[in-house]
């Protein structure tokens, strides 16, 4: 029953979570803006009643949430895989600013940003198990000067964007990391950190809601009956846990059934049958010299245990299992054990036999061996019956000395003496550990800078680390630094010490001395590597002290160097790369992948007067007259412009000329362009026929890049500035300076901004040191982008619930069946 209750509780877990109330935190309220004054923040009216709105302006602001409020926000995100960021805002047009950001330093961890430059909402996040920030982009213009209510929900692997209570996007993303263990992690409102991505406009609420359907706190009228993908993921985990639990219970039940089956086959006979005799359960008996017993129908026999015999020569009598002691003998006041022999005098031997001492005389002629020496040389030894010859090699005749002992001949026998380094009686010798004692006969004699190491039969004096051998007992110091035997890195300094050495990295390097890496203050950007102190080795497409500058691949190539693009194509520089487009007057051949001439005369895109004839030429056209009333003026946007006329367009930013019926326009030159290397990247529409027009100075309104007020500073290298219109790469994103504000986004795809090629496979620009970012528009799979696909999530959730309940029913049925069979067998 306990297992059943656990399963039912797990089934109800998902339904309880679906109905549980979400927990939220008012981030603007946590800042206490109404009680304190902050630079760049002013109170303003909003659209929501009983809530204050705040206008955020200026380039110096610090709206950081710290202390308990930060810990509460982090705990809300850790607690549940589902959360929602709610805000009511009015953003200035063309502003690109952060609404809420968890960041550490210049790096994003979890951030919601709105770009008025590209009209998109961005979710920056670090995926679970990853380290580099990712970005999910939702095209929508929030920065239009009007109030909007925004709800961005993340539910497991799904991100959903609501604007003004309308569902706009639903995307599948890698689940964001929710550990919040990044070092020095901070929480900001209206900015990424104290300097970057400053939101400009008004904020009336910024709330963080934990749990499913968090958007209902802003739009209570929206649908909340369907389970979220986060709830579905929890249901999947619960079903998986139920499946595992049922599998384990099934295995236990199978084992129990097997044991019950064996028990049911038993006839309950517990006795033992042996040699025609039936022995009851627990009975013991002796068979020969073995003691046997019957235990649950099985016979176990062991040898009979005998008491210890308190004599030297116990005797085992026939028919008995244990040896016994016989009587001792008493002779001349001495007791002798049974079987003990002794010689009371020369050539006499006595033996004790069961209390009787039996003595016999030994005949030397029969018992003594024949001697190899003459009788005059033979001699007698007191107590010995037999005579001996001098100089007999008793050791060679056989001995019982230890292998680590030496056999030594005596006059009438041999003796054993342990070798040097061993101790004992000669019959048994053990190694002496000389290292336990210094000096003396049995101690070691190792001196300075050595360590005694015991070996079998002796010892050796081992040199300590950093020393070399002088003689058998002494070692002297080695200078590893001078002998180049150290392990220091090539960029480290070696210092000799007594018996060793130390390594220290040189100035400009860091490490433990064994591995030293050059230090480049601030690090190298855009995939560059630090190759020397303060010097970065830049990858292809970048240059500068820290690889912060884009290398213009479109500059005129050196002599004998092939141009980057094919004939009739213009090079377009991008941060870290470039691409090619067909020049004016040419178009791409989709089959040959080359630039072919455009026939302006056939397509009707020429500017010849109707009285003149258009003649197509390579890369352009010319106008010819063959009648007296023919004019070589230009037909330009529904009007006729005289030949040789010059006019301005786009507020004076473009200068156009008419030459022999051919009209051409070029960007007017700004005052600061005189020192620039103007390439095709910035003047793709500059035609040779209007080259002189580029010398006309443009008004200041056309040249914001010349005004220092509209320059932007690099995110980390504040001494590096960019002019309005310039782009650079930072943290694997394209950044652009426009009128003094910086906006960054994922790199565009190579052609037309599309993420997918003709075959459907996504392809993107390869940037140095960056992984190709994922392309949301190319993601496949169910529940990805369309609102209608929510039905599949609901179907999968219902199918998961049905499967879970079916598993529970199956388990309960099998359990009841087994219990019924068990009880029925017990009744029998």
Image (cartoon, rainbow, N blue to C red):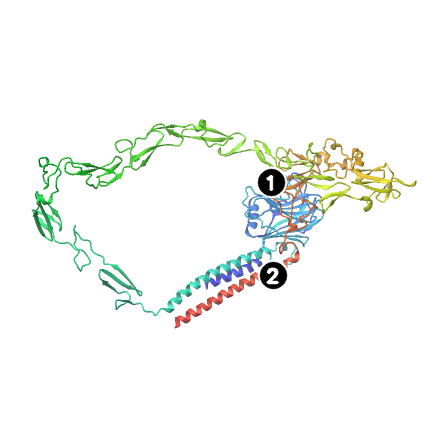
Give the residue drawn at x 24%, y 60%. Answer: 290
Q: Secondary structure at mark 2?
A: helix
The 10 Å Cα crowd at callout 1, few under 14, some 14 to 19, many 20 or more, is some
The 10 Å Cα crowd at callout 2, few under 14, some 14 to 19, many 20 or more, is few
Q: From where the camera sits, is residue 108 visible?
A: yes
Q: From where the camera sits, is residue 523 visible?
A: no
Q: Is residue 164 above or below residue 394?
A: below
| Extreme-right residue of the structure | 628
Residue 623 falls in image quadrant = top right
Q: Is residue 181 left or right of residue 351?
A: right
Q: Is residue 649 left or right of residue 147?
A: right
Residue 770 falls in image quadrant = top right
Rendering coords of residue 395 (x, y %): 19, 38
Q: Is residue 739 left or right of residue 273?
A: right
| Extreme-bottom residue of the structure | 828
Q: Is residue 729 above or below residue 501?
A: below
Do the numbered discs 2 and 1 sit on residues whose CB atoms are within 8 Å? no
- Which badge, 2 or 1, is on the more N-terminal residue? 1
Q: Secondary structure at mark 1?
A: loop
Q: Nearer the viewer, residue 208 or 350?
A: 350
Rendering coords of residue 674 (x, y %): 74, 31
Q: Is residue 612 above or below residue 503?
A: below
Residue 262 falls in image quadrant = bottom left
| Extreme-top residue of the structure | 482
The CA span between labels 2 and 1 is: 42 Å
Q: Is residue 644 above or below residue 762?
A: above
Residue located beneath label 1 in the image: 769
Image quarter where the C terminus lies is bottom left
Give the residue drawn at x 22%, y 60%. Answer: 289
Residue located beneath label 2 in the image: 795
């Amino acid at each position: 029953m306990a297992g059943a209750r656990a399963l039912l509780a797990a089934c109800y877990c998902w339904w309880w979570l679906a109905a549980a109330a979400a927990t939220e935190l008012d981030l603007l309220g946590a800042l206490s803006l109404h009680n304190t004054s902050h630079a760049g923040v002013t109170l303003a009216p909003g659209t929501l009643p009983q809530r204050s709105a705040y206008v955020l302006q200026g380039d110096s602001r610090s709206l950081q949430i710290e202390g308990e409020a930060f810990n509460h926000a982090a705990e809300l995100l850790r607690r549940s895989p589902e959360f929602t960021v709610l805000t009511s805002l009015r953003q200035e047009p063309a502003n690109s600013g952060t609404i809420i950001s968890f960041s550490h330093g210049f790096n994003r961890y979890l951030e919601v940003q709105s770009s008025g430059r590209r009209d998109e909402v961005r979710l920056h996040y670090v995926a679970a198990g990853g380290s580099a920030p990712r970005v999910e982009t939702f095209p929508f213009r929030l920065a239009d000067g009007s109030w909007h209510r925004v709800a961005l929900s993340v539910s497991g692997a799904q991100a959903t964007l609501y604007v003004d209570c309308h569902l706009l996007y639903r995307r599948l993303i890698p689940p964001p990391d929710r550990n919040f263990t990044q070092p020095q992690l901070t929480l900001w409102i209206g900015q990424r950190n104290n300097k970057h991505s400053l939101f400009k406009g008004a904020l009336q609420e910024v709330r963080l809601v934990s749990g499913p359907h968090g958007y209902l706190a802003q739009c209570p009228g929206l649908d909340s009956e369907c389970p979220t993908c986060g709830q579905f993921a929890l249901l999947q985990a619960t079903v998986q846990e139920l499946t595992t639990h049922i599998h384990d219970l099934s295995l236990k039940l199978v084992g129990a059934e097997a044991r019950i089956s064996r028990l049911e086959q038993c006839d309950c006979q517990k006795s033992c049958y042996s040699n025609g005799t039936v022995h009851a359960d627990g009975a013991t008996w002796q068979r020969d010299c073995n003691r046997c017993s019957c235990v649950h129908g099985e016979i176990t026999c062991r040898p009979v245990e005998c008491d210890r015999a308190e004599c030297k020569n116990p005797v085992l009598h026939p028919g008995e299992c244990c040896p016994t002691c016989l009587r001792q003998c008493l002779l001349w006041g001495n007791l002798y054990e049974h079987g003990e022999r002794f010689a009371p005098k020369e050539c006499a031997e006595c033996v004790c036999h069961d209390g009787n001492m039996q003595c016999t005389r030994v005949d030397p002629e029969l018992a003594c061996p024949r001697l190899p020496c003459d009788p005059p040389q033979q001699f007698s030894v007191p107590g010995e019956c037999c005579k001996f010859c001098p100089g007999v090699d008793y050791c060679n005749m056989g001995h019982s000395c230890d292998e680590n002992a030496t056999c030594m001949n005596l006059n009438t026998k041999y003796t054993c003496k342990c070798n040097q380094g061993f101790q004992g009686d000669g019959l048994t010798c053990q190694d002496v550990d000389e290292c336990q004692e210094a000096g003396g006969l049995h101690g070691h004699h190792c001196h300075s800078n050595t360590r005694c190491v015991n070996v079998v039969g002796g010892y050796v004096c081992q040199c300590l680390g950093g020393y070399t051998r002088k003689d058998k007992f002494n070692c002297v110091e080695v200078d590893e630094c001078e002998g180049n035997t150290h392990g220091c890195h090539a960029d480290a300094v070696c210092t000799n010490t007594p018996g060793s050495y130390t390594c220290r990295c040189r100035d400009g390097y860091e490490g433990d001395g064994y591995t030293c890496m050059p230090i480049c203050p601030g690090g190298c950007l855009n995939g560059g590597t630090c190759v020397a102190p303060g010097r970065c080795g830049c990858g292809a497409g970048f240059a500068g002290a820290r690889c912060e500058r884009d290398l213009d691949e479109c500059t005129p190539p050196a002599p004998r160097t092939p141009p980057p693009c094919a004939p009739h194509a213009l090079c377009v520089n991008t941060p870290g790369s470039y691409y090619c487009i067909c020049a004016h007057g040419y178009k791409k051949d989709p089959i040959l992948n080359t630039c072919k001439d455009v026939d302006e005369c056939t397509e009707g895109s020429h500017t010849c007067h109707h009285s003149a004839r258009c003649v197509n030429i390579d890369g352009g056209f010319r106008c010819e007259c063959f009648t007296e009333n023919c004019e070589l003026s230009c037909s330009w946007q529904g009007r006729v412009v005289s030949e040789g006329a010059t006019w301005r367009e786009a507020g004076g930013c473009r200068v156009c000329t008419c030459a022999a019926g051919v009209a051409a326009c070029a960007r007017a030159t700004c005052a600061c362009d005189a020192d620039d290397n103007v390439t095709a990247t910035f003047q793709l529409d500059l035609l040779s026929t209007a080259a002189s027009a580029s010398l006309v100075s443009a008004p200041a309104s056309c040249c914001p890049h010349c005004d220092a007020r509209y320059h932007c500073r690099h995110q980390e290298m504040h001494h590096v500035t960019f002019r309005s219109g310039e782009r650079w790469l930072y943290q694997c994103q394209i950044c652009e300076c426009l009128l003094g504000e910086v906006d960054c986004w994922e790199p565009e795809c190579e052609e037309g901004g599309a993420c997918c090629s003709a075959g459907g496979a996504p392809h993107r620009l390869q940037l140095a040191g960056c992984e190709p970012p994922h392309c949301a528009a190319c993601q496949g799979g169910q529940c990805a982008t369309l609102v209608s696909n929510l039905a599949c999530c609901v179907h999968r959730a219902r199918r998961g619930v049905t499967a879970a309940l079916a598993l529970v029913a199956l388990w309960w049925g099998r359990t009841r069946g087994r219990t019924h069979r068990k009880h029925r067998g017990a009744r029998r």
